[in-house]
Image (spheres, rainbow, N blue to C red):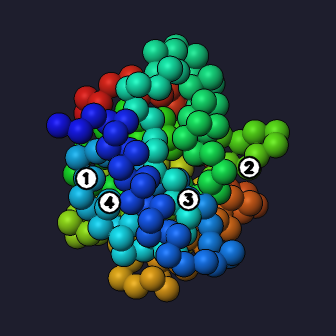
Amino acid sequence: MIKPRNLALLMQRHADLISTTRHDPTRLTCFVSYHDADFGEVESFIRRFGEEFVPRCIGVTPQDTFVGSLDEHYIKSCVREECLGDSTVTIVLLGQETWHQMFVDWEIAASLLEGPTRSRNGILVMPLASMSNRATLPERIRDNFFGPGDEKSSVIYESYPTTRESFRAKLDRAHASRSRAGAAVNNTRPLRRTDSP
């Protein structure tokens, strides 16, 4: 069995190979948040759409030094710096069990973190293709999504893209949501400490 850190490194290498086949300075750098059980589908997503953005795929793993901390702000800050890096959009790909995954919650919380020198990430949430555009939302996403087109939502929820052009448009909407006036960001929910539903 591939250990979580190795799985993340494998996904990043794959994403780098696909991303570098095209030079486009307008592409956004995006962090991809997903549950390890959906590795194959996430890999297919990156294979199909990875030329449209610069992917960052190495998320939180049990080997990260901050995982045992009880300081939630410290955890969010570490995830922001060490995992999200220079990304400006977080793409949350939803499978059957993503909604209750601890590390996915941490990645979403770090994406919503507003700092003195860095704006929060735009968040684009999409069910994976196998979910037939239906999926249970993680609680922190529900805290920040009020419905399609609602200007108060700090999260963009979209169906799985059918074309590269439609995917790029979804990314652009998520990126624009970072500075949307009046968007309500609720990041007060305690971090999940278990994957249990």
x and y percent of residue 149 in the render? 55, 71
Q: Which residue is mark 2?
A: 119
Q: For numbered disc 3, what is the local secondary structure?
A: strand
Residue ID at (40%, 45%): 9
Is 138 rendered above or below residue 152? above
Measured Cα–Cα span from mark 3 to mark 4: 14 Å
The foreground one among 163 and 4 is: 4
Number of residues whose C-alpha sits closer than 10 Å to that of mark 2, classed few (under 14), some (14–19) or many (20 or more): some
Lower position in the chain sequence, tag 3 or tag 4: 3
Lower position in the chain sequence, tag 3 or tag 2: 3
Is 149 rendered above or below residue 114? below
Q: Are marks 3 and 1 in contact (CB under 8 Å)?
A: no
Q: Callout 1, which amino acid?
A: Asp
Q: Does residue 151 appear in this view?
A: no
Number of residues whose C-alpha sits closer than 10 Å to that of mark 4, classed few (under 14), some (14–19) or many (20 or more): many
- Label tally: 4
The foreground one among 65 and 188 is: 65
x and y percent of residue 182 in the render? 73, 57
Q: Which residue is mark 4?
A: 42
Q: Are marks 1 and 4 in contact (CB under 8 Å)?
A: yes
x and y percent of residue 124 in the render? 50, 61
Lower position in the chain sequence, tag 4 or tag 2: 4
The mark found on residue 106 in the picture is: none
Q: Are marks 3 and 4 in contact (CB under 8 Å)?
A: no
Q: Which residue is mark 1?
A: 38
Q: Which residue is mark 3?
A: 30
Q: Callout 3, which amino acid?
A: Cys
